[in-house]
Amino acid sequence: MPAIPSVTLNNGTKIPILGLGCYLLGRNTTSEIVYNAIKLGYRHFDTAQMYGNEREVGQGIMKWINENPQANKRSDIYYTTKLLGENQGYDSAKRAIRTSFQKVNQLEYIDLFLIHDPMTNKDKRLGAWKALQEAVEEGLIKSIGISSYGIRHMKELLEWDGLTIKPVVNQIELNPWLTRKEIVQYCKDHSIYLETFSPLTKGFKFNDHQLQALATKYNKSPAQILIKWNLQNDYIVIPKSSNLQRQLDNMNVFDFAISDEDMKMITHDEAYEYFDWDPTDYMG
Ligand SMILES: NC(=O)C1=CN([C@@H]2O[C@H](COP(=O)(O)OP(=O)(O)OC[C@H]3O[C@@H](n4cnc5c(N)ncnc54)[C@H](OP(=O)(O)O)[C@@H]3O)[C@@H](O)[C@H]2O)C=CC1
Ligand SMILES: O=C1Nc2ccccc2C1=O
């Protein structure tokens, strides 16, 4: 399997364009799943304070590094976590960032720390961002970003006079039935990379007849077509699977291309179907 390519973010750091979503991997199994996924070729892992498995994701990564430190480098791995909503606000965020860091301190730094959602208020969102900026200055974190931010939340942040570090990504739910053209355009205009969660629609769209037709045409599975749809839109993508064979299938997307015509055919700008949560229009 070829190495997963990386792209460069607005601060010059690189991120592998396909990572493993770590929600619901299960606390007892996470470290082994992460370790085995690295053996398969995954180099990017997406967790969160909310998932309760930050420590175990770090342990899986460290097991791989420690088994051959000459060959297996920390810098080859990309580790993302996210600040829980209730930990927003400057003081709470300072504490929670340190707690997350302590859980994986053997990793020496966190590659990317996201504000998980905008569903608090302006003071708490900006206070959390100030704490994240300081953690970058301290060297605990390399990059910071946002998740499920709508345009008003991004404007609030980008126009804030305390902003010293721009978000590198907005992690958001996108799929052929949820294209969010305005948010995508806003992010592109401000050099904020789109990173897509629930890219497989959690399986809900696997029986869609157009998706099935493309799967047959390209001799790929519906999951592989959805992952490729994301990559061809230049989105970073983080499908979750706890199963080794499905993880392998989800990586096996670099040997084909969906035609422009077929990309248009499965893209439904008029639809608005989400399968997780939708905080982007939160008004608080
Ligand atoms: N920022 C945010 O607010 C959010 C972030 N996320 C992040 O995004 C990640 C991915 O999103 P998630 O919501 O988990 O959903 P996904 O769209 O990635 O779907 C995961 C589901 O699809 C199944 N699956 C995976 N691969 C295949 C395959 N090849 N064929 C058939 N079924 C498959 C998985 O089962 P199995 O494990 O058995 O293979 C699981 O049930 C999360 O793990 C998390 O890291 C998710 C939601 C919100
Ligand atoms: O992975 C996730 N699954 C979720 C479900 C509800 C709210 C947030 C999330 C995640 O981040």
Image (spheres, helix red, strand yellow):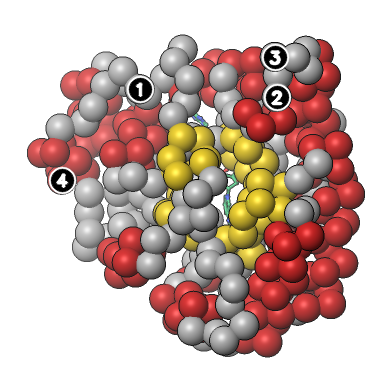
Mark-to-mark CA distance, 2 and 3: 6 Å
Q: Which residue is mark 3?
A: 71
- Name the element at disc 3: loop
- Amino acid type at circle 1 is Phe
Tags 4 and 1 touching, CB below 8 Å: no
Q: Give the residue displayed 36% in from the left and 49% down from the top.
A: 175
* Count of numbered circles on the image: 4
| Amino acid type, residue under disc 4 in the picture | Lys
Q: Residue at x 64, y 65 (%)?
A: 115
Q: Is residue 30 left or right of residue 200?
A: right
**How far is disc 3 from disc 4 in space, using C-alphas?**
43 Å
Earlier residue among tags 2 and 4 = 2
Q: What's the distance in space between the residues labelled 4 and 1, CA to CA?
A: 20 Å
State how far apart marks 2 and 4 are (Cα): 40 Å
Instruction: Give the crowd class for mark 2: few <14, some 14-19, many >=20 residues within 10 Å.
Output: some
Residues at circles 3 and 4 in contact by the CB criterion of under 8 Å: no
For the residues marked 3 and 1, what is the alpha-carbon distance in whole angstroms? 25 Å
Judging depth in this view, the residue of 192 and 182 nearest the camera is 192
* Amino acid type, label 2: Lys
Residue 8 locus on image (x, y percent): 45, 44
- Classify residue 33 by image quadrant: top right
Residue at x-position 66% and y-position 32%: 75
Q: Which residue is mark 4?
A: 264
Q: Classify mark 1: residues with Cα within 10 Å, few (<14), some (14-19) or many (20+).
A: some
Horizontal and vertical percent position of residue 32 = 77, 22
